[in-house]
Amino acid sequence: MKHSIVHTDTAPKAIGPYSQAIHFGDMIFCSGQIPLDPASMQIVGTDISAQTTQVLKNLSEVLKAAGSDLSKVVKTTVFLKNFNDFQTMNGIYETHFADNKPARSTVEVARLPRDVLVEIECIAHK
């Protein structure tokens, strides 16, 4: 079985040597998304609410390009710059995963690309 690269212009382009996602069999492996506007490649928002909303929008667009959506996500990993932002991030996250509650890990990290506050990656099925 061969994998294929998923790419869409409706989500930020990769800012390094990686793909937005990889489609393999019935699974989609999405790279971490940060709160970049896909058109300008500039950071959206200065607080955890705005940044989490943009990250989930970007993930949704990548999944859509792969023929999937947030309702088919089976695992996420959330990277937070400050774990004090967990409750706010979690409230926004919950609105996007109301009917589907994927397995999740959440970790605090020392630094994220472009010094953003949150990054989220996921695995979904088609």
Image (cartoon, rainbow, N blue to C red):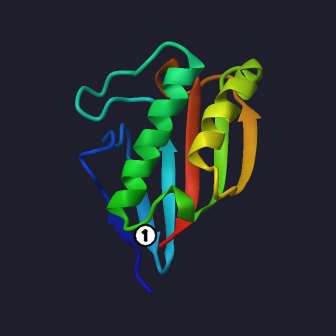
Residue 89: percent from the left, percent from the top? 65, 29
Rendering quarter of residue 91: top right
Q: Is residue 50 left or right of residue 84?
A: left
Task: Say whether residue 104 is left or right of residue 57.
Answer: right
Q: Note whether 91 is above or below 30 in the view shown.
A: above
Q: Quick one: which residue is furthest to the bottom in this view? A: 1
The residue closer to the viewer here, 105 or 67, is 67
Quadrant for residue 117, please give it: top right
Question: Which residue is located at x 45 percent, y 29 percent?
Answer: 35
The foreground one among 96 and 21 is 96
The residue identified by callout 1 is 23
Give the side of residue 95 with respect to residue 84, left or right: left
Is residue 92 depicted above or below 74 in this figure? above
| Position of residue 19 measured from the top left corner of the image (x, y, whole percent) | 38, 53
Residue 120 visible in the picture: yes
Up the image or down, 99 lies above or below 83; here it is below
Q: Identify the amino acid type marked 1.
A: His
Q: Secondary structure beneath disc 1?
A: strand
Quadrant location of the N terminus in the rendered image: bottom left
Q: In which quarter of the image is residue 122?
A: bottom right
Q: How would you rate the neighbour count of disc 1 (Cα within 10 Å): few for under 14, some for 14-19, many for 20 or more?
A: many
Question: Could you say where residue 21 lies in the image, as x and y percent from the top left?
Answer: 42, 57
Instruction: Report whether residue 20 is seen.
Output: no
Task: Out of 31 and 95, give the one closest to the viewer.
Answer: 95
Identity of the residue drawn at 74% across and 40% down: 106
Residue for point 49% across, 50% down: 31
